[in-house]
Image: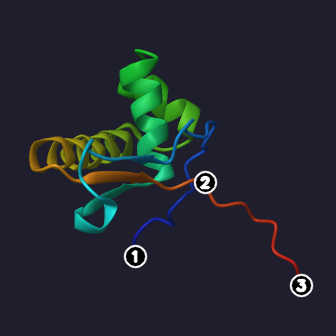
């Protein structure tokens, strides 16, 4: 039986939620979606310069999980840049559900 999945701790919201190539109408663009955990891993490792072990501790996940999340984020960003796709950033979901 697999270990229960833990939710990564997300500590940031992106300043913008959409990036697109200049001069191309939105209706002509494919998009890639970066999840909030991918943005958090990018911020902690690539922007802040933390190693994956430190990022994993802050996000309350394992180092291999951070590595997997980073690989996914890097692949999506490369696809968007190389193939001229838009990037949509998902904001973290809140648990403020009304009954």
* Badge 1 vs badge 3, beta-carbon distance below 8 Å: no
49 to 59, vertically: above or below: above
Q: Position of residue 26 (x, y in %)?
A: 32, 61
Instruction: Measure how far apart labels 2 and 1 are at the Cα level.
Output: 28 Å
Which of the 4 image quarters holds residue 60?
A: top right
Which of the 4 image quarters holds residue 93?
A: bottom right
* Nearer to the camera, 74 or 16: 16
Q: Where is residue 78 in the image (x, y as percent from the top left)?
A: 17, 41
* The N terminus: image quadrant: bottom left
22 to 58, vertically: above or below: below
99 to 33, vertically: above or below: below
* The C terminus: image quadrant: bottom right
Instruction: Measure how far apart labels 3 and 2 are at the Cα level.
Output: 21 Å
Q: Mark 2 points at which residue?
A: 92
Q: Mark 3 points at which residue?
A: 99
Q: Position of residue 28 (x, y in %)?
A: 22, 65
Q: Position of residue 24 (x, y in %)?
A: 24, 52
Q: Mark 1 points at which residue?
A: 1
In the image, is 86 to the left or to the right of 90? left
Instruction: Measure how far apart labels 1 and 3 are at the Cα level.
Output: 33 Å
Give the mark, 1 or 3, whose residue is nearer the N terminus. 1
Q: Residue at x 37, y 37 (%)?
A: 63
In the image, is 39 to the left or to the right of 32? right
* Nearer to the camera, 40 or 80: 80
At label 1, counting other C-alpha atoms closer than 10 Å, the crowd grade (few under 14, some 14-19, many 20 or more) is: few
Q: Which of marks 1 and 3 is in front?
A: 3
């Amino acid at each position: 039986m697999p270990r229960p999945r833990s939710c990564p701790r997300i500590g940031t919201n992106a300043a913008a939620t959409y990036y697109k190539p200049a001069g191309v109408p939105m209706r002509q663009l494919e998009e890639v979606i970066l999840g909030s955990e991918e943005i958090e891993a990018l911020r902690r490792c690539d922007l802040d310069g933390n190693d994956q072990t430190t990022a994993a501790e802050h996000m309350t996940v394992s180092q291999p999980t951070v590595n997997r999340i980073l690989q996914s984020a890097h692949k999506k960003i490369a696809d968007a840049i190389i193939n001229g796709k838009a990037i949509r950033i998902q904001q973290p979901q809140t648990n403020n559900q009304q009954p």
